[in-house]
């Protein structure tokens, strides 16, 4: 069955594809500019209807990749095949993968980065502090396949049919944007209390800590004062750990609890201490 949502071609840790059906129907109608402030794999923004869309992520390699995809459209498919052939990439050719990885770290060819994520362990995008791509090979598990290609083609078509701009800034750039009542900000930052799901950590970029979280909550309060609507994805509780600051802050706004299918499973009942409460916190009526 065809999904009603477009899936990012990047299998992005923290990606919201699986819960889009709980998030997108909560967004306001008739959006002027939609801002995907922590765009990541762009699972959310790509599925939103708005006059214009802003993708932002401080990881500049992502915004460069999506901008390149937008320019090239489906032309990239042939280019991917010729690169796969050139480096004899396959599900078990580690040498081909490592050769392309060193080549990428020298040239920073944008398409090569995408190809590497197709063959990397868990399809992860991870960089060291020198911004060299360092994810290991996904031996016998990862390869460019028809599912990735299908997602990619749908994604490329959507990129070209929508009015999207790409930024790679720290989220605080929003203070410099002139936003009005019809604009809408979606914030999906790294989750302070569930860094484990970010098992590749900061991916070579600035880490997320208490200061960043505080700055973000301040920014959202500022947007609220300006009558700009926002929605924040986060977890109030994760594996028994509570984000008490966020819980307190959220009381000013409307909180929608996101049900995940595993919430009622016997595993979940037996592991009450491992409970996770995923939420969408909005400054408008749901
Ligand atoms: C949970 S992921 C977003 C996933 C995305 N919504 C999706 O569905 O694919 C959070 C993103 O925030 C980005 N990020 C972390 N700190 C940031 C900052 N200070 N400014 C902008 N982006 C940041 C990370 O690079 C990461 O891609």
Image (tube, rainbow, N blue to C red):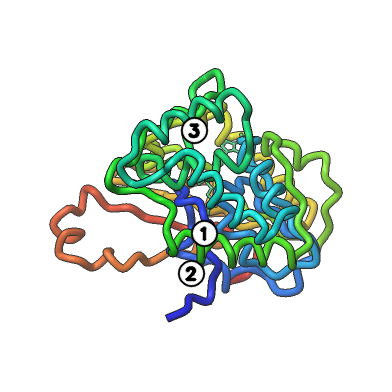
Q: Look at 59% across and 23% down and name the residue there.
A: 106
- Ligand 1 quadrant in view: top right
> Regarding mark 1 in the picture, which secondary structure is present there?
strand
Q: Do the residues labelled 2 and 1 touch (CB within 8 Å)?
A: yes
Of marks 1 and 3, the one in the foreground:
3
- Residue 22 is marked as 2
Task: Looking at the image, tell me whether mark 2 or mark 1 is earlier in sequence order.
Answer: 2
Query: Percent position (x, y) of residue 76?
Result: 63, 54
Cα distance between the residues tagged 2 and 3: 39 Å
Q: Is residue 245 visible?
A: no
Task: Looking at the image, tell me whether mark 2 or mark 3 is earlier in sequence order.
Answer: 2
> Regarding mark 2 in the picture, which secondary structure is present there?
helix
> Regarding mark 3 in the picture, which secondary structure is present there?
helix
Report the front residue among 249 and 121: 121
Q: Look at 74% across and 58% down and name the residue there.
A: 53
Quadrant where the image shows the N terminus? bottom left
In the image as oriented, which residue stretches furthest toward the right? Answer: 178
Report the front residue among 199 and 121: 121
The residue pinned by badge 3 equals 100
Looking at the image, residue 50 sits to the left or right of residue 244; the answer is right
Looking at the image, residue 82 sits to the left or right of residue 99; the answer is right
Task: Looking at the image, tell me whether mark 1 or mark 3 is earlier in sequence order.
Answer: 3
Of marks 2 and 3, the one in the foreground:
3
Cα distance between the residues tagged 2 and 1: 9 Å
Query: Would you say the beta carbon of the disc 2 residue lies within 8 angstroms of ligand 1?
Result: no
- Residue 186 is marked as none
Report the front residue among 235 and 170: 170
Mark 1 crowd level (few <14, some 14–19, many ≥20, 10 Å Cα): many
Q: Look at 64% across and 59% down and name the residue there.
A: 45
Query: Percent position (x, y) of residue 31?
Result: 75, 68
Cα distance between the residues tagged 1 and 3: 40 Å
Query: Percent position (x, y) of residue 107?
Result: 63, 27
């Amino acid at each position: 069955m065809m999904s009603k949502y477009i899936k990012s071609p990047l299998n992005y840790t923290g990606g919201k594809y699986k819960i889009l059906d709980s998030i997108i129907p909560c967004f306001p109608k008739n959006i002027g500019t939609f801002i995907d402030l922590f765009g990541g794999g762009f699972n959310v923004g790509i599925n939103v209807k708005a006059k214009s869309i802003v993708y932002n992520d401080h990881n500049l390699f992502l915004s460069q990749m999506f901008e390149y995809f937008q320019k090239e459209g489906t032309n990239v498919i042939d280019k991917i095949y010729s690169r796969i052939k050139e480096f004899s990439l396959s599900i078990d050719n580690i040498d081909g993968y490592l050769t392309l990885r060193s080549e990428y770290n020298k040239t920073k060819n944008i398409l090569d980065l995408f190809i590497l994520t197709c063959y990397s362990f868990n399809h992860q995008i991870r960089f060291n502090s020198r911004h060299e791509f360092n994810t290991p090979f996904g031996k016998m598990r990862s390869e460019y396949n028809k599912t990735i290609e299908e997602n990619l083609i749908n994604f490329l078509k959507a990129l070209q049919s929508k009015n999207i701009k790409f930024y790679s800034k720290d989220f605080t750039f929003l203070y410099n944007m002139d936003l009005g009542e019809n604009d809408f900000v979606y914030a999906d930052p790294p989750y302070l209390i569930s860094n484990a799901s970010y098992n590749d950590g900061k991916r070579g970029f600035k880490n997320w800590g208490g200061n960043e979280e505080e700055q973000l909550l301040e920014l959202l309060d500022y947007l609220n004062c300006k009558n700009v609507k926002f929605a924040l994805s986060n977890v109030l509780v994760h594996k028994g750990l509570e984000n008490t600051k966020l819980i307190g802050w959220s009381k000013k706004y409307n909180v929608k609890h996101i049900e995940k299918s595993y919430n009622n499973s016997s595993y979940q009942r037996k592991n009450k201490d491992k409970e996770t409460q995923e939420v969408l916190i909005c400054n408008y009526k749901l």
